[in-house]
Amino acid sequence: MEKARLLLATIYGDLTADVVGRGHRFEWRATPVDMGSVSLFSGAIASGMFLRGVTSGYTVSMATVGSVRAASSGNAAEIAPGRSAAVFSPGARSEWSAEGPARPLTLLVEARYLEAQLEALTGVPIRGPLAFSLSMPTTDGPGTFLARLCRFLSTETERAGRALGHPVVMASLGEAVARALLFGQPHDHAHLLDKAAPPSSRSVVRLVEEYLDAHAGGPIGTTDLTTLAGASMASIDGAFFAHRGTTPWDFLRKRRLLLARERLLLAEPGETAASVAHASGFLRVERFGAAYAAEFGETPAETRRRGLVATSAPPSPRPSARSPSPRGAEAATIFLVHRDPSWRGAAAGLLQEAGHAVQAFASSLAFLEAARAVGAGCVVIDVQLPDVNGLEVRALLREEGCALPVVFTSDDGDVTVAVEAM
């Protein structure tokens, strides 16, 4: 029983647990579904159980078998399979009791995550926890969808295996569950959802991401981001946390590390790790070195040595099928043009290790400037670059008489664009 109390406290917060009735053998099992900041526990208790305390996050208590009673802040509710559930808010004294065997289904949403979702939906900074109504009907109305979604996740996640269990998929499902709770159960901030929505929080995130990518090597301040997005920093933070599970500054730090990795892999013999750190936006080299090693499992100097070895190694013999070029240069080079530094760094590293010469560019304009002097090789380009898109780059190359083969990549499954790229 003591182990169960510790585990319950870890999962739910400051709770105490006791068996209901004398002489009962305690048995409690729980199967988790991890969706990042959202978790779902399908459990089973062999005897009656009583919980009392304060939850650390937002908790939706349902049951697939058995009858359960709930109480919080002077209100009471029944948790009945297929009929009703209870929603506990953080900070409120709450009770949960089952008189006999039961199969509870419990949804937990981290407090800051749910509040960030509400900020992203409304553009309004949220101060303090939301206060939800305790009783949630699940026979009809918005609460029905949330209950059905939770039951689906509970039963289907294990069957679907890796496809559904992928972290990206699970994070999206967690967002859907959190928003279903916001729209499906009355709370003291629900009036904000009735107002006209601000510009899409996803578009704000994309806009800020593109800015951070383009300016990662230079100084960036709060004013830069708020002016760009036309929103408060709290709204930007909320949108990032809701859609990316992180802050803009953590995103920028990782982008700078990826930018540094790309530069180290492509470094010239005279470049040092310190110069790369400064060029990638890091002011203190020692902090850069520690963060880099923690992120990639090797030091900047080790990455630089690998890049130099790959660049200096002669390419392995292969059939001489060269792309026609007006310059007739002999060296075949793969030109990578992509807005995502992590993609560029990973692709450049793999190609260099395979013996290929590689040049990487973050924008179409940078590549087109260099393309005036390119010889044999091929171009791998993001079809949806923000400055000049990949299709337009191909047309410009053809106009200049450069017939380099062009391979397009895309993050979106747009059929029209795919057909046009063929």
Image: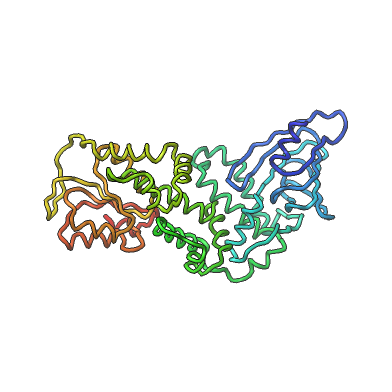
Residue drawn at the location 53% of the way across and 57% of the way down: 240
Residue 68 visible in the current orientation = yes
Q: Which quarter shows the C terminus?
A: bottom left
How many badges with numbers are in the image? 0
Residue 87 visible in the current orientation = no
Residue placed most toward the observer, 4 or 225? 225
Q: Is residue 56 above or below residue 122?
A: above
Tell whether 48 sits left or right of 386: right
Q: Position of residue 228 (x, y in %)?
A: 47, 67
Tell whether 257 sits left or right of 418: right
Residue placed most toward the observer, 187 or 8? 8
Residue placed most toward the observer, 241 or 225? 225
Residue placed most toward the observer, 75 or 347? 347
Quarter-of-image position of residue 48: top right
Q: Residue furthest right?
A: 22
Residue drawn at the location 22% of the way across and 62% of the way down: 396
Tell whether 357 sits left or right of 213: left
Q: Position of residue 212 (x, y in %)?
A: 44, 58
Q: Is residue 165 above or below residue 375?
A: above
Q: Which quarter shows the N terminus?
A: top right
Colour convention: rainbow
Q: Residue furthest bottom?
A: 196
Q: Position of residue 349 (x, y in %)?
A: 33, 41
Residue drawn at the location 71% of the way across and 43% of the way down: 12
Q: Position of residue 376 (x, y in %)?
A: 17, 48
